[in-house]
Amino acid sequence: NVGSGTPQELRNWVEYCNYPAGSALAEERAANGAREPFRVKYWGVGNENWGCGGDMTPEEYAAHYRRFAGYVRAFEDTRPFRIACGPNENDTEWSRRLLAALGERRRMVEGFSMHFYSWGKSQATKYTVETMREQLSSFARMEQAIRQQRAILDGFDPERKIGLILDEWGVWDRMDPEEEKRYGRLWQQITMRGAVAAVLGLNVFHRQADKLIMCNIAQTVNVLHSMLLAHEQHCIRTPAYYAFELAKAHRGKTAVAVEAEDASPLGLSCSASRSDKELALTLVNPRHDAGLSIEAVLSGVAATGATARMLHHDDFNACNTFDSPDRVVPRVYEARVERGRLAVELPPMAIVTVVVRTS
């Protein structure tokens, strides 16, 4: 916590987590039940220092970063990866001034963290067509922000030794005071709209994979764009959980370029990746009022068949609840491959992941 913490505090945490044995804090860790070090690699040196993390100028934060980051040291086989606080959304002035102020101390930065939330004007289950369209359109701005922030980094770091990280993203709807009172601060229901938003974000990351080294949804349980909702003895999967599950087909594959005819913010969103014998393709229709007939030309591969799963609900405000946990779930869907072309019928507000077998 660079905003109100001290370099000593950070140094102590690094020792407690990573020092093998023999120091006071390593022995304290062992007494707490962990003889072996935790080997924590990633260390965020401050968080949102342009706002709630200290309301600093870039130059003020650069001075703090230089003081703090020097105490994040390597122990044995654990080499720390130090992450500097980058911009709020696409604040190019913050990034340029911070990187300039760090000067040659940029060598102490392994990661550069940006945040980009997709703010909403409605409560989660009460979106109108207008507020939904406005929120989902933000993912085009997020993709532009990633391109521009990487370009700024490249100007200071042409060898790309500093990795760009988007470590807070997702939909942030208006909170329901009664739900927060019952379930906790920033509790947020996740709807079919939230699932579409999740895959719009994941598709951005797949398309911009050469510019990013890490992306992290905010967050995983109960708060904001969560995968799970839990209360007392109940725990359910949200539609965003299933959106991420559909994206697992891309894991371990190499991103490949895709081109879509409609490049508007609410046009067809797609991403693709491949391995030796598979091509994974994720398609999202963010429109509420029209289906899409998709024909994808598969260049450079011979397709032998395909399987597909779809997440869809006619009501974009539909959600899973503790009483009805399976209202929005994926199902098997038909995709046809003929003569090097993939055909998919995509209903409104639908997500489809197709896995094409190739030879």
Image (spheres, rainbow, N blue to C red):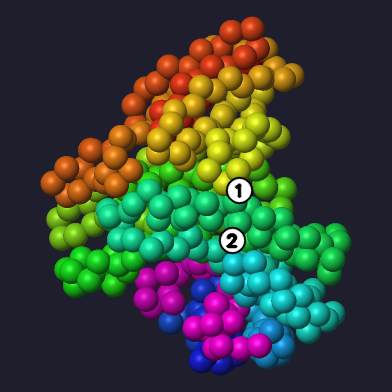
Displayed quadrant of residue 94: bottom right
Q: Kindly check if marks 1 and 2 are in contact, taking CB atoms under 8 A apart as contact.
A: yes
Residue that sits furthest to the top in the current view: 339
Quarter of the C terminus within the rendering:
top right
By secondary structure, the bulk of the magenta-drawn segment is best described as loop
**Is-magenta flag for residue 232?**
no
Residue 348 in the image: x percent, y percent?
41, 33
Mark 1 or mark 2: whose residue is earlier in sequence = 2
Residue 327 in the image: x percent, y percent?
23, 38
* CA gap, disc 1 and disc 2: 9 Å
Residue 178 in the image: x percent, y percent?
18, 69
Give the residue type that dot 2 points to: Leu
| Residue hosting label 1 | 205
The reply, left or right, for residue 217 in relation to residue 142 is left
Which residue corresponds to the image point at 21% horizontal and 43% vertical from the top-left? 325
In the image, the segment drawn in magenta is 29-57
Residue 41 in sight here: no
Which residue corresponds to the image point at 52% horizontal and 32% vertical from the top-left? 283
Residue 281 in sight here: yes
Q: Is residue 11 above or below residue 318?
A: below
Question: Mark 2 Cα within 10 Å, few/some/many (few <14, many 20+)?
Answer: many
| Residue hosting label 2 | 166
Query: Does dot 1 land on a helix, a strand or a loop?
Result: helix
Give the residue type that dot 1 points to: Phe
